[in-house]
Amino acid sequence: MKKTVQYFLFTGLIATVLVSCKKDDDLVDVPAPDQNEVELITTFKIIFTDPANVAPTVEAIFRDEDGDGGNAPSQFDDIVLAENTTYNAEIILLNESESPADTISNEVLEEDGEHLFCFTPAGTNVIITRTDTDGTFEVGLQSQWVTGAASQGTTEISLKHQPGVKDGSCAPGETDIELNFVTIIQ
Amino acid sequence: MKRFYTIILVLSNLFGFSQTDSCTFILDGTIHTDIEEPTNSLQIVLLNAQKGARIAADGSFLINDICKGNYTLQIRCFGETVQENEITIQSDTSLSLLLDYHIHNLKEFEVIIDENEQNTFIKNGLTPKQLNQTRGLSLGGMLEEINGVRTLKTGNSIAKPIIHGLHSNRVLILNNSIRQEGQQWGAEHAPEIDPFVSNSISVVKGANSIKYGFDAIGGVILVEPTRGAKTAGTYGEVNLVGLSNGRQGAVSGSMHTRLKKLAALSLSLQGSLKRGGNQHTPSYYLNNSGIKETNFSTLVNWEKENYGVELFYSQFNTDLGIFSGSHIGNLTDLQNAFNLEKPLGEDKFSYEIDRPRQRIEHELSKVSMYFKTGDIGKLNLVYGRQYNLRYEYDKDQSLNDSIANLNRPDLQLELTTHTVDINWKHFAKKGFSGEIGLNSIYQKNTYTGRMFVPNFENQGAGLFWIERKTIKKLLLEGGLRVDYRRLQSFFWENDEIQSPTNEYLDWAFNIGGRYSINNFSSIRFNVAKTWRPPSINELYSDGLHHGAAAVEIGDANLNQEDALNTSIEYDLNYKWLRVNVQPYFNYFRNHIFLEPQLPPTLTIKGAFPTFIFKETEARIYGVDFFAEAQINKVFSYVINVSLLRGYNISLNDHLLQMPADNLKNRLNISLPQCKGLTHNEFSIQHSFVAEQSRVPENSDFIAPPNAYNLFDLTLSSEITTPYSSVNVSIGVHNLFNTRYRDYLNRFRYYADELGRNISVRIKIPINQ
């Protein structure tokens, strides 16, 4: 019994030493290419169109080409809308660090059951309702903005990623976008 | 008794006279010890002769009227057996007993080496009892048993030791004498060591000995693997641990063998497995907080009187689920999470580990040799290679299904480190004993995926010289050290590879002493000057620290940290009372810290608090107090108190993340023996952690949590079976299922600490 145990130990030892030794194949002096997070959203664009064709089309863009850190965002527009008008709004998300730019909002649309856009106006006269649906809940890529009298405030637009937990409210999930746009109605 | 040592038995001068059937033999000798406790805490016992003797203050002992025969010789410290050997008495026998960590071949009859491993610095080890009662916990978790050591936690699976307020790159961990290298700058990166590999885990608090390293400003943690059997044969140990919270199970087995025919060769094989599922706070489950661990190690040791070789290999592999409620999107999410009664998401038990998760693999290969250089010294050569792989899988997978199906980690870091250490110890010559040595290191780091720290190449070399001398009752130690480090980083900037180099060269020293006031008290003091080059994240991090909801920006122009550590220890060991007081004062001429910066960084995810690594003048001081009273044969009481203050002198404010004051006390009740059950003990422990009211302004999203009290119960016993003695211990941690949060746990932003946890620990020694 003693001998068997000892033989077992010997074999075990040799086996483990042979099986071991992991190594790093990357080159230290050639760093991995600047690989941004796959779904880096560099650009948020919201386009307002007047179905009555009275007010001109308005666009508001937030752009941060290199993502978190690095340089500050290069563009952060105000949302400027005409008073007493009903607008249809469409949100487009782009990854402009790729060439050609990748339209991330298409993928959000594909996974609409996991996403929800939330709109929170403050101090400004606008009523916002989401107009699209994923079959069960709203999504928010398309929304309707009804403006009232001239005013100036802010609107917080956020995108919540809610895989498996979407319940129609803005509470669950992780925030992938949170932008507070200055909103001027004139 | 606070420390665990290995005592070797060296036989010398066996007199050849034999007297048949006579019971007049004498066993005498001396213990040459460099232990911190006075020698009269030691006893030598001949078990089957039912004879024993106390060891006198000068180390001598004498047992007479022994009959010829075979006996079990035990060395006991405060009644606890620390060493046991078989001995045959055929005549008057003299023994010379030495304290050493190496196990020498028992067949040698000369006094082998006087390894003057005297310590002037304060070293606390986990006692065998503490080891038994914390088995199955991570290394950080086990180290909390040591007074003055706290842990920085990211949930319950990730725990890093904090010594006197310092952690990560300021605390050096020596894994089998090799510097543990594995992205330790990260607060959420736990040390990749399996504590099951070791029966000797100790902590040196503060930068008290430059021989371990120049940058160990906070202290050193020493993990030594259990080495082979002293006598020919095979023995081993199996440990089984079950924890109710998380339904966690761990099993570890080790086997050590020494062949009769090749007494110099010993082999050890050890492995452990751990598996746990979602853990539970008093009110809810922490979703995705499971753990999986597979580790093993092998050791081959060839030890002769004049030389020896050791080969060691260990692998540590773990998968950790990161509580899904902690991976928040932005600051608004974090503030909402804090205000919730219960985290969003699922609330049920599962062993499944999903995203977000970490996978870490750590491999250590070590070759070491020693040679006796004549009668004057011993030369040690050590080569170590470590490979550390870290995968981080973020919560969100790619929206693109084909990419998502590849299931690649979002961040992969590989760190390969080679170390070569050479040192020469010289034995007492005119009272001086010491060592000189050279430490060298080469490491390379690469990453794939999102960048948080760049690729780098780090090279360094250091020379040190330590001398010790005993002058009457005073033991003095002085050490001097000089180190060079060269760090070259590689990263892309505007489509070009930048490769800046940072070089550092500086010296470190320590002066310490130990004065024996009398037979039962001593005083130690230590003054050390150390320094630490900035770590890679302090220099080059630039971006969102996922999971921390903060942007951290490094500064490539940071200077090294410079520190002056001073500490004193008073130790009293008188009859039924033990007292130990350790005040310390550390001054940092340059201390690197994270300073909040306005305005917050604006990103598409919202605004994030921003911090920049900066230098400041700082001080950290405090006191660790310990007392143990053996009230009578049944009751003993232990109390530990730790107080600490950390101050940012330049900013005139407190330092961030300093441990709050805490107190731990325990009542031990020795229960009577009953058939087969010995060493029965029941204990009640209470710990109090104060609210950390000393925090810097604007550096945190949420105020530190309230003070809390926790109660634990433990029942332990040794079951004597015809085969061996099995140690069993059953415990309840957080007996009253108290809801609380701890300032040093990053998860305090999102969830409560763990609720009640019932543990069962079984240790089965295997002897052949």
Image (tube, rainbow, N blue to C red):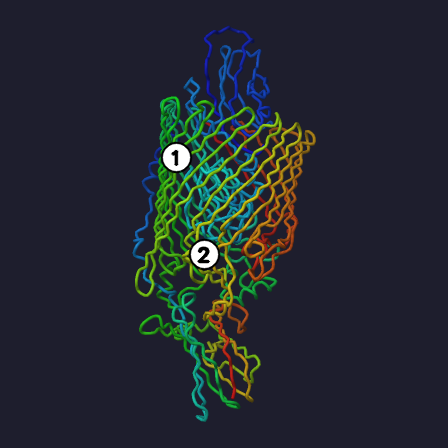
Whether residue B72 is visible, yes or no, is no
> Is residue B708 positioned above or below B368 on the image?
below
Query: Please, which residue is most extreme toward the right here?
Result: B632
Residue B410 image point, x, y percent = 39, 60
Residue B280 image point, x, y percent = 57, 54
Subunit that carries the residue with mark 2: B
Q: Where does label 1 land, which residue? A: B437
Residue B338 image point, x, y percent = 58, 62
Q: Quadrant of the C terminus of chain B?
A: top left
Q: Earlier in the sequence, mark 1 or mark 2?
A: 2
Amino acid type assigned to the residue bearing label 1 in the image: Gly
| Residue at 41% across, 19% down | B108
Amino acid type assigned to the residue bearing label 2 in the image: Arg
> Going by the image, does B410 lie left or right of B610?
left
Residue A177 image point, x, y percent = 47, 71
A51, B624: nearer the viewer: B624
> Going by the image, does A80 lie left or right of B701?
left
Secondary element at image label 2: strand
Q: Where does label 2 land, which residue? A: B357
Whether residue B225 is visible, yes or no, is yes
| Residue at 50% across, 13% down | B93
